[in-house]
Image (cartoon, helix red, strand yellow):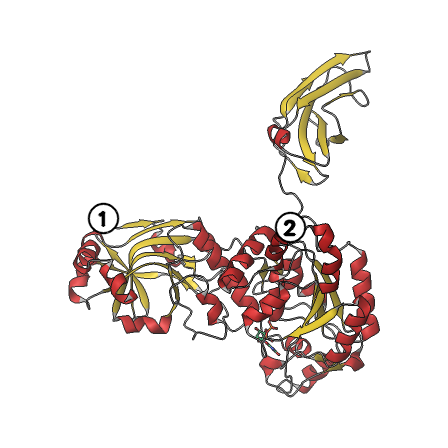
Amino acid sequence: QSQELSQARIDYHVALQALQEHGTRMVCTGKMHTDRICRFDYLCYCSEAEEFVFFHSNSSVMLPNLGSRRFQPALLDLSSVEDHNTQYFNFLELPAAALKFMPKPVFVPDVTLILNRFNPDNLMHVFHDDLLPAFYTMRQYSDLDDEARLVFMEGWGEGPHFELYRLLSSKQPLLKEQLRNFGKLMCFTKSYVGLSKMTTWYQYGFVQPQGPKANILVSGNEIRQFARALMEKMNITGVEEAEKDGGSAEDEKDKDKKDEYIVVFSRSTTRLILNEAELIMALAQEFQKRVVTVSLEEQSFPSIVQVISGCSMLVSMHGAQLITSLFLPRGAVVVELFPFAVNPEQYTPYKTLASLPGIDLHYISWRNTEEENTVTHPDRPWEQGGISHLEKDEQERILASKDVPRHLCCRNPEWLFRIYQDTLVDIPSFLDALKEGMKTKPVSKKSKPASTVHPGRVREPQCQTSVQTTSEAKLTVSWQIPWNLKYLKVREVKYEVWIQEQGENTYMPYILPQQNYTFSENIKPFTTYLVWVRCIFNKNLLGPFADVLMCRT
Ligand code: UDP
């Protein structure tokens, strides 16, 4: 039925004629291949050649028209991983007249988002590289709605997490291998190619050792909106929703405390916690809370999310499963364990996530420092950290090393050897790390989301000057409150004034509670001062500076 309906939506002959007459049209955003997303009318795909095809005609459009710079190195990144040379997108060109000699095209009526999944076998990559970027790319282009079709061109099979990709739209996503079922030539009536990188926070170490991205543009709010949308699709009601329906926060406090529980996310095949039962007992005793374990091997993903979305603490060995901390409620604690010789400061995808502005999670790491508590696996295959294929010298060097030196992705044998160790967690040292970590910030489940409304510019900034003596002068600066302040309840409003003597390269900053001030210290007569004023809410929400004032004493 739905197949028939979608076919009925487009008239084949009209579509074919449009393609022949108008050819392909492309308009893109972005100055560089790394920040480009393109929208196409009538982009085609030839499954025989495994190439996209752009048909030129009198009215085709190609913007940007890069000429052969289109291949230096590519038109755009097809995955959200920046400038990865296995993830480039480009198309072949043909004159529309060539259609006469080609197989009859099959038209795809759905608005389509074409992308590469980066590593669909790994849950962290699924969320960070694919689901979040696709979700927000779809929010960017309103015709990529619930009816949109996703096409995954990386060439992999469905993978273990395909159900998650299916949550992005009501239509079944298509894999590259399935495209040939549609015939030799298929043409996407309307399509977008590429993914927004706006939501990614981590780089995996292809050109420099892994770490947080240099310029993170996502905040906890967008992560949470995404998590909420996904949970809705999975038919899970989060605690935050449940709280809204329940009684007043005060009445519920005691009950909530009793209901609080800790989740231990366990891995059952590699990077094991060898004394998990002991760890669970210690957590239960220390915090007087229930402790629940989950694992990807034993539960459905939605049931894991259900559990995690209501817990007050998530404890897990470093690994992809920790991406589920994006489903934690505000105020929850994330505790990440690291095997021997692995420095928590150098592998921070989950720490960075838990530290995004406004995400309101509390991150703590623990590292095994006792070599006798680690179990190594030198004889496993290299990709699971085996080292027996290496030269004897190299094996000995790795075995003697107590800290994995910084390295690039992805096949560093010392890194793989250490990260795939199993760990007997030393309970006293673990609890110490936890207690120490909890000191730094009070953790409250009820903590209010920090306000993120920034001040506007101060209005009508003015200065007045007077000369007192040949060596003394006064400078009075005044201004009006920012326009948006009169609609806001702000705990603390302060103003910052910068004063710079013209021609000097340093300035004096002042923080003031009131809307005017007379400066007399260090103010010289017959001198020009440049003065900037801005408003600050609650100590750290900075507003913009008003236009600079030129004040001559
Ligand atoms: N995985 C798992 N249980 C295990 C080991 C791995 O569920 O005992 C999952 C893990 O969450 C990830 C995938 O298998 O989605 C690949 O795991 P790997 O150890 O290769 O990657 P990492 O967790 O270090 O990112």
The structure residue drawn at horizontal position 24% and vertical position 63%, both measured from the top left corner, is 7
Answer with left or right where residue 62 lies relative to residue 338.
Answer: left
Query: Which quadrant would the N terminus be assigned to in this image?
Result: bottom left
Kind of residue indicated by mark 1: Ser
Q: CA distance from mark 1 to mark 2?
A: 48 Å
Crowding around mark 2 (Cα neighbors within 10 Å: few <14, some 14 to 19, many 20+) is: some
Relative to 286, residue 447 above or below: above
Which one is nearer the viewer's eye here, 27 or 490? 490
Answer with left or right where residue 514 lies relative to residue 129.
Answer: right
Secondary structure under tag 1 reads loop
Occupied quadrant, residue 296: bottom right
Residue at the disc numbered 2? 358
Relative to 232, residue 502 above or below: above
Residue 4 in percent (x, y) is at 25, 65
Answer with left or right where residue 185 lies relative to residue 134.
Answer: left
Viewer can see residue 67: yes
Crowding around mark 1 (Cα neighbors within 10 Å: few <14, some 14 to 19, many 20+) is: few
Secondary structure under tag 2 reads loop
Which labelled disc corresponds to residue 59?
1
The structure residue drawn at horizontal position 72% and vertical position 27%, both measured from the top left corner, is 499
Residue 342 in percent (x, y) is at 71, 71
The structure residue drawn at horizontal position 55% and vertical position 57%, both measured from the top left corner, is 228
